[in-house]
Image (cartoon, rainbow, N blue to C red):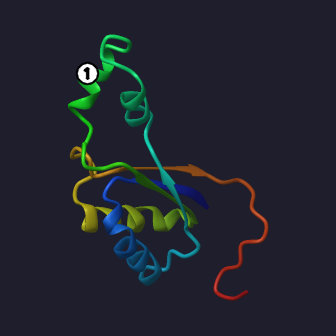
Amino acid sequence: MRLFFCILNQTEKLDAILTEFALGGINGATIIESTGMAKILSHKHDDDELPFLASLRNFLNPGRQNSNLVFTIIRDDQLSVAVEIIEKIVGDLSKKNNGIVFSFPIDYTKGIIENGK
């Protein structure tokens, strides 16, 4: 099993991703509204205080205020399915502002019910 994370910048596509997850057998995701560190710092400091923020602003989408952090426990064989679903909806994750995905192996769970068992 894996703990799968998706930082979704295109929050308007959340429902489409969750629907496709469900259709693909990925269930039980948790969603947290989030804001990145650079976005918070850019609102609190001048370029003179934190010079690196000027360069970071070039990478930020000024129209986007928040992101969604989507996480779920998946089987190992569902990892490629999850990534394919996300890229089908938001586009190539190697492109700017499409989001980030990552996962960790899980060595213990309790309370996960699969297929009504």
Q: Position of residue 92 (x, y in %)?
A: 23, 55
Locate the C terminus and report the quarter of the image it occupies. bottom right
Q: Spot the residue most to the top.
A: 48
Q: Is residue 59 above or below residue 70?
A: above
Labels in figure, total: 1
Q: Quadrant of residue 43?
A: top left
Q: Is residue 52 above or below residue 5?
A: above
Q: Spot the residue most to the bottom.
A: 116
Look at the numbered disc 1 and give the secondary structure of its residue. helix
Near mark 1 (Cα within 10 A), the count class, few <14, some 14-19 or many ≥20, is: few
Residue type of the residue flagged with mark 1:
Ala
Q: Is residue 117 left or right of residue 85?
A: right
Q: Is residue 4 above or below residue 65?
A: below
Residue positioned 37% across, 15% down in the render? 50
Q: Quadrant of residue 59?
A: top left
29 or 108: nearer the viewer: 29
Q: Position of residue 109 (x, y in %)?
A: 75, 62
Q: Which residue has dot 1 on it?
A: 54
Q: Spot the residue most to the right.
A: 110
Locate the N terminus and report the quarter of the image it occupies. bottom right
Residue positioned 49% across, 80% down in the render? 25
90 or 116: nearer the viewer: 90
Q: Position of residue 98 (x, y in %)?
A: 27, 52
